[in-house]
Image (cartoon, rainbow, N blue to C red):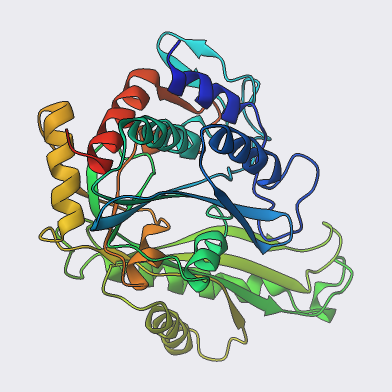
Amino acid sequence: MSDVVALLQQLVAIPSVSPMGNPPGRGEGEGEIARALVSRLRAAGFACEVSEGAPGRPNVVARLAGGDGPATIFEAHMDTVSAADMVRDPFAASLEHGRLFGRGACDDKAALAAMVVALEETARRGTPPGDIILAATADEEYSGSGVQHLIDQGLRADGAVVGEPTSLRLVVAHKGAVRLRITTHGLAAHSSEPDKGENAIYLMAPLIEALRGYAESLGSRQAHPLVGRPTCSIGTIHGGQAPNIVPSECSIVVDRRLLPDEQPEAAEAEVRAWLTQHCPGVAWEMSVMLYGIGMDTPVEAPIVGKCADALDRVLGGHEIAGVQYGTDASRLSRAGIPSVVLGPGDIAQAHTADEWVEVAQVEQAVAVYREIMWPS
């Protein structure tokens, strides 16, 4: 078994489920996996910095000093989504037919393991052309606070490679997102006398219909060449306490995906204006759950060329791409660090009930990352 597969099995076996904005509970958060990484990296001779952006949510940073060439950040997150609905043991890290199964195997521990092993192999060669910074971050799956904490603490470089499942395509653009909670308030009453109350679910109905029209209108907008058009979707709806009670409250969560040049504040204002125009006389409240900006790194950026050259040497070619989902790369880009997203695994397997990653692609990722760190 290769070193990277053994490390990936170890990482997958450690639960690091995101508590999604709550204090970490048992089996949640990045604490245990951070300790395992620090132990390995220190044993390999790396000094590690551990910092918490929130209680129990550590980031780990290791550095390899290089020459006077460009400094590069290699970033991957340690947290995963919930493992509650998986159809096999989420932490068994089982190997079957060239695939490694488990929560986080694809998103994002495959990239993390490959970056660690590439860093160790590069260090054994000597002094690379430029500084290499490995950042294993917390809280990517919920709010991105982990990488933002590092940025606020002064993390900087000339470029960044963010490990996410891109099937080793070189992603230079992705969408942003605004997540909005919309609530209607009614008046509770006994369901046998509904006329004595006001049904909050009924009040929500015209808003849902209006949002469907808004989502359809986005389909006529000009598409970005790599990520397509903006979208809007209602993801959840909650209302009522019991069948025999007229519901006093109903809420929905709206996911509005942004093109790279759209601003979250403007998209929120646009949704507000649409509902105000199309639902006159309906009272509702809106709160922001998430602001996430997009990313659009010019293909002429040095980090893009460096990664493209590495892919050409290892795989014999490269593909420039954009993706619909968001990543920590947008925050690094906003901080003035030109960034790309590049990692093993297919996003179609991320967050699934039987999440897995192709072992061969994880091993290829080690070689690709190593070539970016120090071209052969």
Q: Is 6 left or right of 271, judged from the image as shown?
A: right
In x, y percent, where is residue 294?
33, 66
Give residue 359's position: percent from left, percent from top: 39, 19
Position of residue 220 measured from the top left corner of the image (x, y, whole percent): 20, 68
For the N terminus, the image quarter is top left
288 up-or-down from 371: above or below: below
- Give me the residue at 65% from left, 46% from top: 30
Query: Residue drawn 77% across and 63% down?
Result: 240
In this image, 113 relative to 170: left or right?
right
Q: Quadrant of residue 70?
A: bottom left
Q: How many marks?
A: 0
User: Where on the picture, by quarter, is residue 296?
Assistant: bottom left
Between 282 and 122, which is closer to the camera in this rendering? 122
Q: Nearer the viewer, residue 173 or 132?
A: 132
Q: Which residue does the image show at 53% across and 74% down from the upper left? A: 206
Question: Who is closer to the viewer here, 367 or 233?
Answer: 367
Q: Quadrant of the C terminus?
A: top left
Task: Answer whether residue 22 is visible to the viewer in this image.
Answer: yes
Indicate the position of residue 43 as horizontal and vertical percent values: 57, 32
Residue 167 visible at all: no
**Residue at image point 31% right, 66% down:** 337
The quadrant in which residue 285 appears is: bottom right
